[in-house]
Amino acid sequence: MKGVLFASVSIVALTLGARSLLRERQPSRPASDLSRARVKTWNSPPLGAASRSRPHGSAGESVDVAEVTRNFLLFFIVPLWACVGIADWLCHRATSIETTTGAKESIIHLLMLLEMGMPVLMGLFLEITSPVIALMIASFFLHEATALWDVSYAVSRREVPPIEQHVHSFLELLPLLAVSFIVVLHWPRFRALFVRNSHDPGPAFRLKEKPLPPSYSISVLASMTLLEGLPYLEELWRCLRASGFRLVPPAGRGERSTAAARA
């Protein structure tokens, strides 16, 4: 049942992402119009002369690789990330986290949500500068360390079934993909972290000059709240209530629940 549910969520995310990507594609124009057309960008820095060249597809249609990459990040990676988060919450519920690892593991989940929520908010509202990219990378590595702590604690008190392990692999890979796409789209800013005499003009942290569409930002914030924040807060409340507001349930109770799950 969990496998079917997870597959369904993934299919929905793939469908929505593909639909959004197709909707964003521009209709082909004559060559004379293309020379006068301005490529739609959402706060992307100059990518260099080589990056501004627009390779042609098999049918002669011009393609903006940066725009396709950006849309793939915004309309596929981010929605899929939210869907996998709710799948992980369902796995915790199915293994009776409230009687095994308890509120301690739930607090670790909320900590990981905060660690990845900060880069998402920066990407939505701030210019992608070198310090912003550095913070995103640092947040990713901090999230990975917390994820290792989470799994190490979870396996000591409850069964972690294969489907949940598979969900965890998505939760580790998708943030890496998101940060990698941002680095590729803003390569000069990333390079400035390592090359002397290379720096960003203006303040390190500033609002976007060309904000993302309000409808997109609102959709991401709503999905983070409904599919991530509220479910994990409910999980924390459920764990605290089941254990008498202790961080960890009594050892005997957790061992019996784990033995029953393995049986």
Image (cartoon, rainbow, N blue to C red):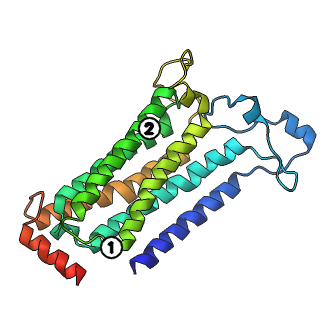
* Outermost residue, top side: 197
Q: Determine the image quadrant of residue 250.
A: bottom left
Residue at image position (70%, 57%) is 22
- Of the 4 image quadrants, the one containing the N terminus is bottom left
Q: Which of 162 and 242 is in front in this view?
A: 162
- Of badges 2 and 1, nearer the viewer stands 1
Q: Determine the image quadrant of residue 256.
A: bottom left
Image: 47 above or below 226: above
Residue at image position (77%, 49%) is 26
Residue at image position (39%, 61%) is 168
Residue at image position (44%, 38%) is 137
Three-letter amino acid code at disc 1? Pro
Three-letter amino acid code at disc 2? Met
Relative placement, left or right, of 69 versus 64 is: left
Q: Which of 23 and 129 is in front in this view?
A: 129
Which residue is identified by label 1?
161
Relative placement, left or right, of 215 versus 115 is: right
Which residue is identified by label 2?
136
Image: 81 above or below 96: above
Q: Is mark 2 on a helix, strand or loop?
A: helix
Mark 2 and mark 1: Cα distance apart in space: 30 Å
Residue 252 percent across, percent down from the top left: 7, 72
Which of disc 1 and disc 2 is earlier in sequence? 2
Q: How many labels does the image show?
A: 2
The reply to whether residue 222 is in sight is yes
